[in-house]
Amino acid sequence: MKRFLLLTLTFAGIAAFLPSCNQSKKSEMVRKEIYGTYQGKEVYMFTLTNRPGNIVKITNFGGKINWIEVPDRNGKKENITFGYDTFDGTVNGDMSFGSLVGRYANRIANARFTLDDVEYELPVNNGPNCLHGGPQGWHSVVWDAEVVSGSDFPAVRLTYVSPDMEMGFPGTVNAEVVYTWTDDNEIVMDYKCSTDKKTVVNVTNHAYFNLLGPGKGDILDHVLTLKASAFTPVDSVMIPTGELRPVAGTPFDFTSPHTIGERIGENYDQLILGRGYDHNFVLDKTEPADVEVYEPVTGRVLEVITDQPGMQLYTGNFLDGTDIGHGGTVFTHRSGFCLASGHFPDSPNHPDFPTTALNPGETFKSQTIYRFSTR
């Protein structure tokens, strides 16, 4: 009887210890540190470490992904995204690096749109257009942030209340994104938005990638497969014409693998207008992954999986070496690429495009995954 009682007490002690042990493990998976202050609000840097020991860093200033450290085929770990070492660099540097972009990602023509016969005027910050929700869009605000409890993987929830008429957009929007860093080296981004007044919403993440590692060369030899049979051609100010042009027979056909640089310099109207690739692709939605990028020197692979209808490919055409990032990295012409999931540019002015309207009582939900591996 005494032996049985001792065993019972021992097992009870172990059971009591396990929750605190698990809690300790979870706290090791997400580290929260003061990064700076902005407009009277504290800004944090969250370091997410998965069980293989790979790291993602996210700040609640602009919801930016600041660091992604993953191994190459030989196990050597390196950061492969653009970002800054300091808060001042993050605030004053390129607004798009790693940003959570809204209320409307991409361009809106002439910085205006009409919704239910009411015209809304937006700030102009890209030629005659509004880009990425305006100069004080969601990329430049401090989001409320918390570590997600009860998650199997390190995760951070960011929330923001975007007031009615912020940057000219109607409706008070409650926005949320949860970043989860899985043991399979996936950044899972779950977006959710609701509104009290009809509005338009298009959200994305605008991370730049170089799978060699930023500062290690350009991205022209990265091999791209993009499962899209059509793209949306643009006019002289990078606004879609309304055409859905088949990629077949053009330098925009990445339905089979091609290096990014193989045809980027061709004498093709859309490459000339964009000074390279800066276009929305109409996703086929027929494959498990919508995009794959393979870097042959390191063996690193990036896959992008999304439930959104479009994917903006941007090849760093306007990077000019004026921005200095992690460890003194100089971001030069075509030293990084972006793959931003979302709806098509200027959709509020194109009734034939998939709608971006959000009504009161509805909830916009979306998921995009960046998955990293090697081969």
Image: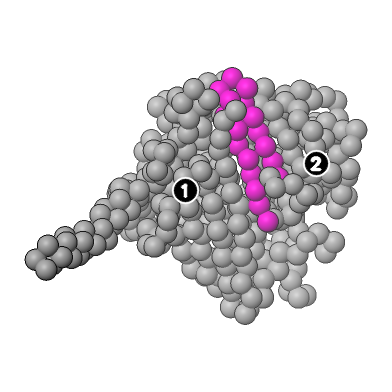
Q: Residue at x 41, y 52 (%)?
A: 154
**Of residues 349 and 54, which is closer to you in this image?**
54
Q: Nearer the viewer, mark 2 or mark 1?
A: 1
- Three-letter amino acid code at the position of disc 1: Trp
In magenta segment, residue 294: yes
Other residues around mark 2 within 10 Å, as few (<14) / some (14–19) / many (≥20): few
Vertical arrangement, residue 85 with respect to residue 164, above or below: above
Residue 18, percent from left and from top: 26, 58
Answer above or below: position of 260 versus 246.
above
> What stretch of residues is rendered in magenta?
290-307
The residue under the point 65% across, 48% down is 305
**What residue do we see at 46% from left, 26% from top?**
75
- Of mark 2 and mark 1, the one earlier in the sequence is 1
Residue closest to the eye, 123 or 172: 172
Q: Which mark is residue 236?
A: 2
Quadrant in which residue 349 is drawn: bottom right
Mark on residue 181? 1
